[in-house]
Amino acid sequence: MTRIVKYPHPALRYESTPVTRIDEAFRTLVRSMFDAMYEAKGIGLAANQVAIPKRFFILNLTADPEKRDQELVFINPTIVKRHGQVEDEEGCLSFPGVYGNVRRAKKIKVKAFNLAGVEVEFEADELFGRAIQHETDHLEKRLFIDWIDPAAMKGLAPKVRELELEFRQAQSAGLLPSDADLMKQLDQLARD
């Protein structure tokens, strides 16, 4: 089963490499990511949030597994235009319980490939635009906490430290590999 990694897993700061083939194994991975996203009650999930350092993410703004017609896959996405700015609250499945205001472009244009390998282009604003920017940041090893005002971040620091402590305790207990071993796994997956 595909599992969502939590901060400070090294995959969250690992720059993704381009997807070079869309085959049955890739489609199976995408489906398992949707399943994990729905189980976590999310609307978007980047590949590196499941420790796969590849440049793609998924979205379903309804967060409803019954609405598969709303599922979108963005492979090798690039935001080609940004207009205006707007601030709103964000959270992240890799940061359970952490929420903060993030300033993003008000409207964007993104190009990517879909699961059929066809190039697609979207103009997006509101939640759709924010979600695309959030997930694209993941692929470029940026996290939403990087954009939160430093004064506001001070209030979130205890929760972030708690996530770090839980992660390190899981490593100490042998439930998770060391950071060095995780980096070796990521390096291998990035080359595949």
Image: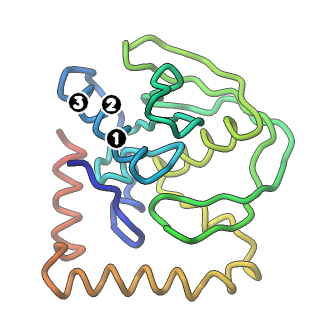
Q: Which mark is residue 35?
A: 1
- List the residue tagged with mark 3: 28
**Left or right: 188 in relation to 20:** left
Q: In terms of depth relative to the viewer, which is nearer, 66 or 44?
A: 66
Type of colouring: rainbow
Q: Residue at x 30, y 84 (%)?
A: 168
The local secondary structure at tag 2 comes to: loop
Classify 130 as above or below 169: above
Q: Residue at x 32, y 79 (%)?
A: 167
Circles 1 and 2: CB atoms closer than 8 Å: no
Residue 3, by quadrant, is bottom left
The local secondary structure at tag 1 comes to: helix
Earlier sequence position, callout 1 versus callout 3: 3
Q: Residue furthest front?
A: 66
Marks 1 and 2, how far apart in space? 21 Å
- List the residue tagged with mark 2: 19
Q: Nearer the viewer, mark 1 or mark 2?
A: 1
